[in-house]
Image (tube, rainbow, N blue to C red):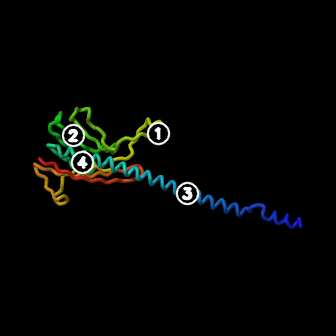
Amino acid sequence: MTGFFQNKLSDHSGHTLVEVVIALICSSIVIFGLAGVYAYGIKEFNSATSRLQMFSEGNLMLRKIESFIRRSSNIYVVENSDPNRTELHLTIPYESNGGLMEFFTNRRDQTLRVNDWRIGKNNANVRLLPLRVLSGDNQSHTRLPYHVEKMHFQYGDAQIDGYDNTGSAYLVRIDMVLEDSLGNRVSLSSTETRLN
């Protein structure tokens, strides 16, 4: 009888190599699946955060430019076939140094800039977009989180906007596209009218 119990115990005392391999494969699939879901979630979170930042900052800048257009006494759009070579020149009345402002895109670093002479020439070539963010552990370095892919200024079009520019009223269209390093893009557009 003792031999019978010993044989039964030895039959169930361990796992075969096939069982161990199958268990390892199954656990590896589960672990890689969870890691993939986690990585996808992080990527989507970063993309959504980046798109929200571009939308918020771009929208805020459009509102600022619109307010300058409404207050301006003179508007001149430097048009070009390249949408990133257009410029918007404004004169804001009742401000020092003639209230001159020039909005343009710097193609070298793909930023939106302004030459603002209202308070002195030291304010020329000021970067408006994108805003810098701190990066790195010591946060001593800054980086540009996205770039200005397109910044196009043009006068309103009679066929598209149903508006004819005259000497006393101007409608300006602004088309902006921002893009981050992940390939996320945000497109923003605006029309604003200056009336005398």
Q: Quadrant of residue 34?
A: bottom right
- Sequence-wise, the earlier of marks 2 and 4 is 4
Closer to the eye: label 2 or 4: 2
Secondary structure at numbered mark 1: loop
Closer to the eye: label 2 or 3: 3
Which residue is found at the position 78% from the left and 64% from the top?
Answer: 12
Secondary structure at numbered mark 3: helix
Q: Position of residue 57 (x, y in %)?
A: 32, 46
Which residue is found at the position 19% from the left and 58% from the top?
Answer: 161
- Sequence-wise, the earlier of marks 4 and 3 is 3
Tell me the residue that label 3 is attached to.
34
- Sequence-wise, the earlier of marks 4 and 1 is 4
Q: CA distance from mark 1 to mark 3?
A: 28 Å
Tell me the residue that label 4 is attached to.
86
Judge whether 188 appears above or below 8 on screen: above
- Sequence-wise, the earlier of marks 1 and 2 is 2
Q: Quadrant of residue 7?
A: bottom right
Q: Nearer the viewer, residue 3 or 130?
A: 3
Tell me the residue that label 1 is attached to.
136
- Sequence-wise, the earlier of marks 2 and 3 is 3
Secondary structure at numbered mark 4: loop
Q: CA distance from mark 2 to mark 4?
A: 14 Å
Q: Are marks 1 and 3 in contact (CB under 8 Å)?
A: no
Judge whether 96 appears above or below 56 on screen: above
Tell me the residue that label 2 is attached to.
101
